[in-house]
Image (cartoon, rainbow, N blue to C red):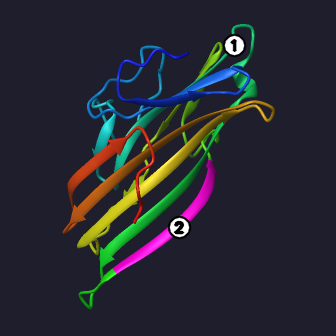
Amino acid sequence: MIPDPGGGAGGGGGDKDCTILVRGKNGAALSKGNKLQFPYAGSRQVLGADDNKIHFGWKVEIIGRVLDGSDANDWKFVQTLDRVDSFLSFSGSWVSKRSSFDESLSGPDVYKNQVSGNTRYALDSPGLTKDSQLTTLTLKANFTTKFTNGESTCTAEWSMTLNIRNNVLMGAEWFDHHISLD
């Protein structure tokens, strides 16, 4: 089991070949063994709400660990995202758009990840690109993050919300479980 200093969602595999922890507690530091850095965060390398020059989001750290003697290079992170964007249209009515997709968190260019012995780390900061057209928008998103080698899989479920008004982040929350998207 991965020690959780707080603010984590995690789970194990059915055969206990691995464990996974997704950390997102607002203001929490990255794990000591994690040498990765969030882009555009400068010296503020902490988890939580992210309002940088290009996007609004929530910074999380993902930690996967395999049994001693196993190689974390043989494992990867993948996740499924199910989200609802609700926004005020130019006509003044509320519009909701639901979408789902799968993504790999192991690509070298898109998501940073590193291996240290039997542990793999990744950083993610899902959210929305800043746009002057974001007058009123609420994003609710559920994530199912998996650590897998194709034979064994560990799973963690987590969620986040963002509330944007006039292109300003007015509120954001992180949850260590799925939330209702309705």
**Residue receiving disc 1:** 67
The residue at 47%/20% (across/down) is: 34
Res. 99 mark = 2
Q: Give yes or no for residue 106 being in the magenta stretch.
A: no
Q: Residues within 10 Å of mark 1 (few under 14, many from 20)?
A: some
What residue is shown at x 29% (from left), y 43% (from top)? 49
Residue 52 versus residue 20: which sits nearer the camera? 20
Q: What is the x, y in percent for residue 106?
A: 64, 38
Estimate the x, y position of residue 125 in percent, counting from the top left.
42, 45
Q: Is residue 10 visible?
A: yes
Residue at the bottom extreme of this rendering: 91
Q: Is residue 137 above or below residue 116?
A: below
- Quadrant containing the N terminus is top right
Q: Position of residue 72 (x, y in %)?
A: 69, 21
State left or right for residue 11 relative to residue 18: left
Horizontal side, residue 15 vs residue 122: left or right: right
Q: Amino acid at mark 2?
A: Ser
**Image-based side of 85 in relation to 109, left or right:** left
Q: Secondary structure at mark 2?
A: strand
Mark seen at residue 106: none
